[in-house]
Image: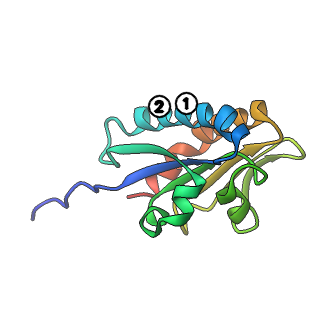
Amino acid sequence: MASSPRPNKQILIVTGAHLSAELYDRPIAYRLRERVLHAIQESDGPEQVLVCSDLWYLNRDPLRELPTVSIGGPAVNALTAYLADKLPSVFAIDGQLVVQGDWDKAPLACCWGIDAERTAAAADLFAEKYLEAWLGALV
């Protein structure tokens, strides 16, 4: 019996198109991208990890079918605003930061905080505590 072909899906990391999101959240997204690439380097996971804006993501149907991590709070990222009441919190420090996701149902996660420092901390927490399980749900 032949093995199944390698999945050719992409992973998206979505930031807001808001100016502060471009300034603060996009660098966080690129740092998370490097961690995801490192984690999937030796696996049969997706070959591409792309960073894009919420405007591209929300206006392109095919993109919404891809595994996605949203970076930045609801005030600056429309995807996080949409998902904020739809995804449970997997980790939260009240009034500081939140990591949301439910990778048993869909490969979606949100990482955000009250400022850039806490958003970075949320993304780091996601990478350290949940990335392996999240990537495992993609198979």
Choose between 118 and 3: the one closer to the eye.
118
Task: Tell me which residue sits at (41%, 36%) in the image.
Answer: 37
Type of amino acid under label 1: Arg
Residue 130 position within the rendered picture, expressed as x and y whole percent measured from the top left: 59, 45
Identify the residue at the far left of this view.
1
Residue 96 position, x and y percent, is 85, 41
Judge from the rendering whether residue 121 lies leftward or rightward of residue 12; answer left or right. right
Give amino acid for label 2: Glu
In this figure, which residue is indicated by the disc labeled 2?
34
Q: Tell whether 40 sits left or right of 74.
A: left
Q: In the structure shown, which secondary structural element does the residue marked by tag 2 occupy?
A: helix
Q: Quadrant of the N terminus?
A: bottom left
What sort of colour scheme is used for the picture? rainbow
Query: Mark 1: which secondary structure?
Result: helix
Q: Is residue 90 above or below residue 43?
A: below
Give the label on residue 48, or none. Answer: none
- Residue at (75%, 33%) from the top-left corner? 116
Say if mark 2 contacts mark 1, CB within 8 Å: yes
Residue 54 at x, y = what percent? 59, 54
Which residue is at the far front? 19
- Mark 2 neighbour density, 10 Å: few (under 14) some (14–19) many (20 or more): few
**Residue at left 42%, top 43%?**
49
Residue 17 vs 37, above or below: the answer is below
Which residue is under mark 1? Answer: 31
Residue 97 coordinates in the image, percent (x, y): 80, 43
